[in-house]
Image (spheres, rainbow, N blue to C red):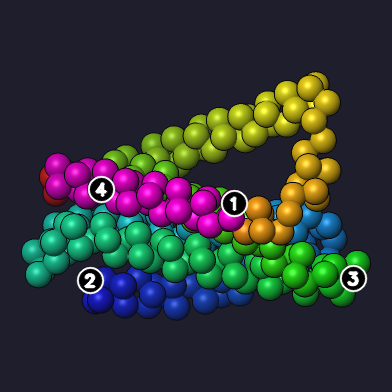
Amino acid sequence: MKGLLIKDLRLMKNMGNSLAIILLVAVGMSFYSSDMSFIVIYLAIIGTSFTSSTISYDEFDNGNAFLFSLPVSRKDYVLEKYLFAILMCGGGWLLGSVISIVAGAARSGLDPMEGMMTALVLLPVAMCLNVLLVPLRLKFEAEKSRIAQIVIMGGIFAVVIAGTKIAERLGIDLEALGERMPVMSARLGIVVALGICIALLLLSCHISIKIMERKEF
């Protein structure tokens, strides 16, 4: 598995110019966007999408048939993809958090601790992106998996928007409710959300292993 991870990291090293452009775009957005959550999620999604790129790279020119002729099991392959996805998504989340907190403090005097709490709330959301992306990409070809991801992400956004509208009709001020939430309750909520995210990742990994075991190359 170590060799697979080194392979994927070297592939990312070759994409240094693209990574630099993405980082510059994120820095530029931080000076114009007052919503720090957008930048954090943006970089987390970009980081997660690189996992799909490495899977496409492995599939190119029937590469998987050669890859699995080496002493690499399908389970090791899946575990490495999840580890790589978590590293890339976590790296994107960290960069987005730092950029947003620094830009917010410089532009509007944002309290760094408040910014850090917001970033921690977004961490489980960012990590759970891998729950859907990896099994979909392993199950379907690149184009089909991209369509499935768009449909699922659109459904999630629709549920969130519908939930917000329902809360407004019921007279529930979600922003005020979040501000009144005690710090300890917020921290407990983050821990619980991370626990749920880890459980979902383990389930997703198990499903992905089954998918790979049934694939023919």
Q: Is residue 26 above or below residue 2?
A: above
Q: Mark 1 points at which residue?
A: 189
Mark 1 or mark 2: name the one nearer the start of the chain.
2
Q: Distance between the residues labelled 4 and 3?
A: 45 Å
Q: Distance between the residues labelled 3 and 1?
A: 26 Å
Q: Distance between the residues labelled 4 and 1?
A: 26 Å
Q: Name the residue under label 2.
A: 1
Q: In this view, does 186 lie above or below 16?
A: above
Q: What residue type is labelled 2?
A: Met
Q: Mark 3 points at which residue?
A: 109
Q: How crowded is mark 4: few (under 14 residues within 10 Å), some or many (20 or more)?
A: some
Q: Is residue 58 above or below residue 169?
A: below
Mark 2 or mark 3: name the one nearer the start of the chain.
2
Instruction: Name the residue: 35% across, 59% down.
Output: 82
Front position among marks 3 and 1: 1
Q: Are marks 4 and 1 in contact (CB under 8 Å)?
A: no
Front position among marks 4 and 1: 1
Q: Which amino acid does label 3 sit on?
A: Gly
2 on left or right of 39: left
Q: Mark 4 points at which residue?
A: 206
Q: Residues within 10 Å of mark 1 (few under 14, many from 20)?
A: few
Q: Do the residues labelled 2 and 3 touch (CB within 8 Å)?
A: no
Check if residue 65 falls in the magenta segment: no
Q: Distance between the residues labelled 2 and 3?
A: 45 Å
Q: Give the range drawn in magenta.
A: 188-215
